[in-house]
Image (cartoon, rainbow, N blue to C red):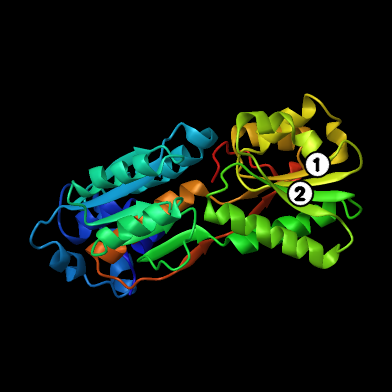
Amino acid sequence: MVTLKEIADKAGVSIGTVDRVLHNRGRVSKENIDLILCIARENGYVPNQLARRLQDNRQYSFGVLLPALESEFGYWQQIKEGIETARTELNSLEVDIIYSFYDRRSPDDFLTACEHLFANDISAYIMAPLMGDATRRVMGDHGSVPAVFIDSSLPGISPLYDLSQDPEQAGRTAARVMDLFDSSLDSVFTIQTYSSAYNGRMRAEAFLNAYRAVHDDVPTASINIATEDDFAIIPDMVGRSGRVGLFVVNDGVHRIVDAIKSSDDISRFTIIGFDLSPQNRELLDSGLIAAVIGQRPRLQGYEAAMFLYRAIVLGQERRSVHIPVDIYIKENIPEDRSWF
């Protein structure tokens, strides 16, 4: 059966406009009324479906649990902007969205942010399961509240919906891209700045396994950046000579480049990073990094909120979808300044 979102896309209007037409709420132009009703009839939409769900005028509250927006160079802000786009489309459909933010380096701050969120009697929530033990504790304590994962999966946990990128696929893709840019590297390293992040570890492991399968004679290793001082000694960690490949598993690749430029010859490095942030976009355009893997943070946020609406309000079936692994090189940098 066709959904409100599909009718809205076909008609070129918002979901709110479709809802007002199908349930006689508010003013809509006659042209849009005729178009929406025609599309609904042709696609077998049952107008009373949503009405039955909302007949008690219930207000649904969706929680969103994210790291501080100013952290990680704007990545989480992109996810929030996707959620806000969904909020705009859903604001006439009895749905509210409540945010709670935390310091991703502090499990205690994460738990405090969770309790703040659940104190609001939320119907379901969106979260990035960055802290494994703390996330398992929260989901154990609040197992009756449906959750949607974004950014990362978590082993042994099955949320209502997992809208994250497959980290192993991303790692294998990065290894293939690395080999295409330079098949004669003297050494290859992965670099992580958040060693506790499950998806980062899986990206690094899949990258190294895929690269070693083709180049079993090339030395490889993983580097964890634990302190600010570690950035300055990256050239010492990887060696001061030879051609080096670096795969940085998150959006902090520009910090790695800055550290290398200050004390080494950047031209001997082939570097692949994550996320099309403004800083990484500039490095890609200048040729200082070879490629960037994208994971569409805005789309993650938007689809997570829309999925909760479909699952919780409309009662549609759960499903599992992975965010595509995008590859950006200098020649295909999008004109749009968003991260997608």
Local secondary structure at mark 2? strand
* Residue 239, quarter of the rendered image: top right
Q: Is residue 318 visible?
A: yes
Q: Are marks 2 and 1 in contact (CB under 8 Å)?
A: yes
- In this figure, which residue is indicated by the disc labeled 1? 238
- In this figure, which residue is indicated by the disc labeled 2? 189
**Nearer to us in this view, 52 or 64:** 64
- The residue that appears at 43% across and 54% down in the rendered structure is 129
| Direction from residue 232 to residue 64 in the image, left or right | left
Q: Is residue 261 above or below residue 1?
A: above
Q: Is residue 226 above or below residue 15?
A: above
Report the quarter where the N terminus lies: bottom left
The residue most toward the top is: 262
Q: Is residue 8 visible?
A: no
Q: Position of residue 180 (x, y in %)?
A: 83, 55
Mark 1 is surrounded, within 10 Å at the Cα level, by few (under 14), some (14 to 19) or many (20 or more) other residues, namely: some
